[in-house]
Image (cartoon, rainbow, N blue to C red):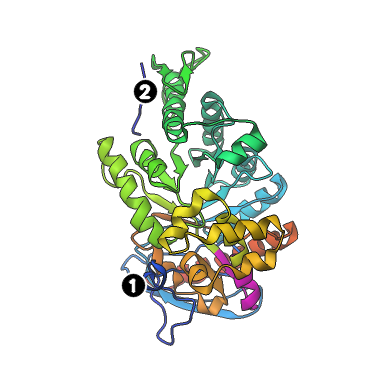
Amino acid sequence: MLVTSSSHVVPDSGRRSRMTAHCSSVGGAPIWLSLRVSFITGIVERPNGAGFRFTVSVMGRRNLSTTGYSRLMKVGIALGGSPRDVAVLASRAEAAGLESVWLAELDRSAFVQAAAAISATSRIGVGTAIALAFPRSPTLTAMTAWDLDELSGDRFTLGLGPQVKRVMEARYSVRVEKPALQMREYVQAVRTVWAANRGEAVVHEGEAYRITMPTFHGPARPERRDTPILLAAVGPVLSRVCGEVADGLLGHPLASPCYLKEAVAPAIAAGLERAHRPTGACPISAMPMLSIGDDEDAARRAARLQIAFYATTPSYKPILALHDRAALPRDLRRAFVNRDSDRMATLIDDDLLDAIAIAGRPDEAADRLRAWDGIAERVILGVPWYGMTPAQQREAIEAALEFAARAAQAAASQPG
């Protein structure tokens, strides 16, 4: 049998900076927030819904003051590095009051990094954003996720993604012909393994996966939950799959608020309807790209270069098309092949940059958060990494954690 479990910041009055972009200018909606070149948090909702004011120092430099209220979302931070570094940073993120930390899978295992974060914390949520699904058996992924969830005390979230075809084949030697169908079955198969280990008599027999021995018949663990599963998606087909089977969707850093609202959210809704799931069963976790510092030109160039790198990939062309930049990948790929990073950065104009990223000086970025209001349940804030050294990335995360700690402390100290 087949188991298919369905398991605002209000800105201060004053001039609007050029960092405040609107959909009408490039096919997008207003965009929001952040800090140096890093990840952040600190959105706190007062019980009476009133605003709060906090003043913080980023890297010991410019003060950033903002007044706000939040009906908003959870705010998390993307971490990375050695297991030792991740443990230290996750502990500091928890002390700063962040909702969650998230680990990616570039040149290190997302699961090992997650284990390091879990072992160093006791309250904060820990998730993978993302762990690659297709190079792994669903059974192994199910076992690993349950181990991490148990280790964390039910704080773990399994974020999975398919990766693009070229990377799957060239790096992992894995061929995927029907990624949407395979991802749907992957989630179902993982939940089948969990159900079997709770003591249910279940197997998974599908087109992509056939798991007829989902457990070694050890002691049943009926008390164990289904670990939440979030899927990364860009296009409408996989976004619809998310609506059918996932507990949430992880947006791509290129996915602007407009793209999430106009392309992704309707596809999720269609998937929810198709699977007869309730509205809100698959919320969006957005992953905005942040690049902020006192050197405005340098901060904006870092974001331009990261957008340019992502945009060389054909899979992300629908995002560019929404912003009237469908022809951009051709020129970007030529510059990428020629290793011309200056040309790559130059090809990302101001309008496109401000539609996708939060980039510039910190004192001009404080009101950017509200663009995601009503679109995402959570934001996972991340820094540009393409062309950056490990030391630069670590410096960015350090700045973010300092910002987050001061902001959370200031907000918590407000009366009411």
Using the image as rendered, state which of residue 317 and residue 355 is in the foreground.
317
Lower sequence index among marks 2 and 1: 2
Q: Where residue 389 sits: x, y (%)?
A: 74, 59
Query: Up-down: is 258 above or below 113?
Result: below
Residue depicted at 53% across the width and 44% down the height: 127
Mark 1 crowdedness (10 Å alpha carbons): few <14, some 14-19, many ≥20: few
| Residue 53: quadrant of the picture | bottom left
Instruction: Name the kind of residue labelled 2 in the image.
Output: Val
**Farthest residue toward the bottom?**
14
Tag shown at residue 3: 2
Range covered by the magenta-colored residues: 290-303
Using the image as rendered, state which of residue 137 and residue 373 is in the foreground.
137
Q: Where residue 400 sits: x, y (%)?
A: 60, 64
Left or right: 16 in relation to 79: left
Query: Up-down: is 58 above or below 206?
Result: below
Residue at image mark 1: 50
Q: In the image, which is nearer the foreground, mark 2 or mark 1?
A: 2
Residue 295 covered by magenta stretch? yes
Q: Where residue 73 sits: x, y (%)?
A: 40, 58
Tag shown at residue 138: none
Using the image as rendered, state which of residue 340 and residue 1 is in the foreground.
340
Query: Up-down: is 338 above or below 9?
Result: above
SS at mark 2 in the image: loop
| Residue 14: quadrant of the picture | bottom left
Q: Where residue 368 sits: x, y (%)?
A: 45, 71
Query: Spatial distance from mark 2 to mark 1, Cα to Cα?
Result: 46 Å
Instruction: Name the kind of residue labelled 1 in the image.
Output: Ala
| Residue 329: quadrant of the picture | bottom right
**Residue 36 seen anywhere in this rendered image of the structure:** no
SS at mark 1 in the image: loop
Residue depicted at 48% across the width and 17% down the height: 214
